[in-house]
Every structure is written in C-alpha cells, then in structure tokens.
Amino acid sequence: MAETFKAILVSRDEEKKQSLARVEMSPDELMEGDTLVRVSHSTLNYKDALAVTGKGPVIRRWPMIPGIDLAGEVVSCESGAFAPGEPVVLNGWGLGETHYGAYAGMARVKADWLIRRPQSLSASETMAIGTAGYTAMLAVMALERHQITAERGAIVVTGASGGVGSVAIALLARLGYEVIAATGRPQEADYLKDLGAAEIIARQELAEPGKPLGKERWAGGIDAVGSVTLANVLAQTQYGGAVAACGLAGGMDLPTTVAPFILRGVSLLGIDSVMAPKAIREEAWARLARDLDRDKLKAMTSTIGFEDIETAAADLLANKIRGRTVIAIDG
Ligand code: NDP
C-alpha cells in the first residue's frame, strides 16, 4: 500500500464559503511535477495566513493545500537534477496558490523551483527565514544595487515587528546600516533594538496623509505596509535615495505624488519573491546564509505544530505574532 501523509486541504462551496479539512493523502493525489519532496518544515507568512483564514484572495485553484514555503528532502526526481535525500528549499512559484503547497507531509513540484539548502542552514532555519526573510534579503540587495550604502544615511523599515521587518532589521544592522524601525507595537521596542534597530518610531507617524515632500529623514526604506505609509516614506526620503516596496499589510493603494521622484530623484524599487529568477534566489539564499545573525534569527522565531496552523494564522492577521513562525510538519 502506498505511503500516506497528512495534509491541510482548503475547499470552497458554490457560495464561495471556504472550509478547511485535515486529510490523509497519498503521493498519487498530488499535482503534476517531476520531483517528490518529503516536507519537514514550513512556515507562516502573511500570504499563508490570508489563505488559511480566507481573508484574502490568495488561493486561485480549488481545492488547495496552502503553504508557500517548504524545506525537506528529495524522495525522487525524474529529471535527475536532484538526488534522493538531497536537502532542498522552495519559496513561492505559486505553491499554496495554484499548486498544492507545503502544509502536507509531501509535495510534488518542478525541480526548477527547488534550490539546494545552503549547507550552513538547517531545514528549520530556512523556514524561520522563509519567504518573508528571503524577501527582506531581496529588498536589501535592491538597495545595494541602487548604491544605498550605510554611509548614505539611515534606512527606515516599516511593519518592523513582522516577518519581513524583523529579518530586514537584523540584516541591515549586521551590514552596518543605521536602522529606524516603524512599528505599531511600542511594547516591542526592546525586541526591535535587540535585532539591531537604532531608533523606534510610531507607525502612526507615517499613517496619516502627509505633504508631497517632507523633511529628508532617511536614505532609503524597506516597506512592508504600502498605502499612505509608503507614500510618507517616499516623501521623507533624502535626495537620490531609494525605497524597496515589498508589502501591503496596510493597503494595496499608493496615494503618492510624483514629487519625490522628480524633485528629489528618489527611486521606488519593486520587490517580488514569487516569480524571482533562480539566479537571484540562489544569490539571496547565499547572502542569508552569510549575513543573517543566527542568534537574532532564533530570537525572532517561534515554532508551532501542524495542529496550530489555523490559530496562528488568525493571530498573525490580528497583529499578535512578532517575527517569524516555523511549522514543524513532521513533528
Ligand atoms: P507580518 O504580518 O509578519 O508583518 C506585517 C507587519 O506590518 C505587522 O507585524 C505590523 O508590524 C505591520 N502592520 C500590520 N497591519 C498594519 C496596518 N494595517 N498598518 C500598518 N502596519 C501594519 O507579515 P510579513 O512580514 O510576512 O509580510 C509583510 C508584507 O509583505 C505583507 O503584505 C506580505 O504580503 C508582503 N510580502 C511580499 C512579498 C513579495 O514578494 N513582495 C513576500 C513576502 C511578503 P508592526 O506591528 O511592527 O507595526
């Protein structure tokens, strides 16, 4: 008899009402792909929380196994790109959206989507980083490509206590940047300072519509919030600075003017992790293995079990989770 494994399956009825079930599946029920992976760990990103709770249109094929990130070992690979037993990581590529995802004991995927797990990172550490952390790295790399060096001035990080924000702060601080953390949770000030933030500002300071140009406060930014917050971050960026936009936790709109762009030469750098080409992913993961302080990663991470996923998803959207959450799938 074929091996079975547990999975979370999200379905929706004719009235588009979403429901979630814990099921036993066998590998032949998985979707197409040339590589079978035994999943040991996954994680909870903002997008996963939206998919599990049904509070955002993340799932685009029904039913769906959610989970956009996995770490595990290759069971078999038809193309020969990976040997059985090789440790791998997968972020995005439609996993948990259009292709059965990580909240299951096994996943069948395309070998092209997988990267080899960096030797110095454990499976659990790669999921502590997850898409949120890999996106933070992509944002740092984008600022670097734009010559925003530590000498140019401070970097503001919005949504600071969240997953992207926490990893961004730890990375930037390790690379010598002065970090200004914008948070709605003043009680997390010590946490953010321990990660490396030099200054904490209130989320509210950036939440009200402001002037097209404000006082020049930072050389750059990493923004996980979007909307009015991103508009204010742009308006307060120094001449020639750059802001990496990677999130929409505060809204998808962007009520800005062209003033920061045409009067201060500010650049808005778009960050996408889902379809990023393999070479950029490999560079980001090599950088994460090198530049992310493991003690800080540990300090920002909690681990939950498979049975805790729904509760943690609701908590994340209620802004009750700080940093990153690993899911022990085989635990
Ligand atoms: P988290 O929920 O972990 O963090 C988001 C943080 O944003 C919260 O912790 C909170 O920080 C802040 N926040 C939440 N709600 C609001 C609000 N209404 N107004 C202002 N600030 C708010 O999510 P992640 O870090 O995993 O993801 C952050 C964003 O980045 C999401 O929008 C996600 O979709 C996006 N993302 C995009 C990727 C890409 O490829 N472009 C990849 C990964 C994530 P605090 O309490 O400190 O204020």
Image (cartoon, rainbow, N blue to C red):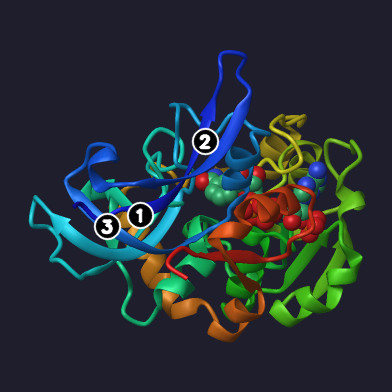
Dot 3 crowding, Cα within 10 Å, few <14, some 14–19, many 20+: many
Dot 2 crowding, Cα within 10 Å, few <14, some 14–19, many 20+: many
Contact? badges 3 and 1 (CB < 8 Å): no
Residue drawn 47% across the image and 27% down it: 60
Dot 1 crowding, Cα within 10 Å, few <14, some 14–19, many 20+: some
Three-letter amino acid code of the residue under disc 3: Val
Q: Is residue 1 above or below residue 248?
A: below
Point out residue 279 in the picture as x, y percentages from the top left corner: 29, 56
Residue drawn 55% across the image and 82% down it: 293
- Per the image, the residue denoted by label 2 is 10
Image disc number at residue 321: none
Q: Say whether residue 99 is left or right of residue 77.
A: right
- Which image quadrant for residue 201? bottom right
Q: Secondary structure at mark 2?
A: strand
Q: Nearer the viewer, mark 3 or mark 1?
A: 1
Which residue is nearer to you in this view: 214 or 84? Answer: 84
- Per the image, the residue denoted by label 3 is 37
Point out residue 190 in the picture as x, y percentages from the top left corner: 83, 79
Give the Cα separation between the discs numbered 2 and 3: 21 Å
Q: Say whether residue 176 is left or right of residue 137.
A: right
Q: Is mark 1 within 8 Å of ligand 1?
A: no
Give the Cα separation between the discs numbered 1 and 2: 16 Å
- Per the image, the residue denoted by label 1 is 5
Point out residue 270 in the picture as x, y percentages from the top left corner: 54, 42
Q: Nearer the viewer, mark 1 or mark 2?
A: 1
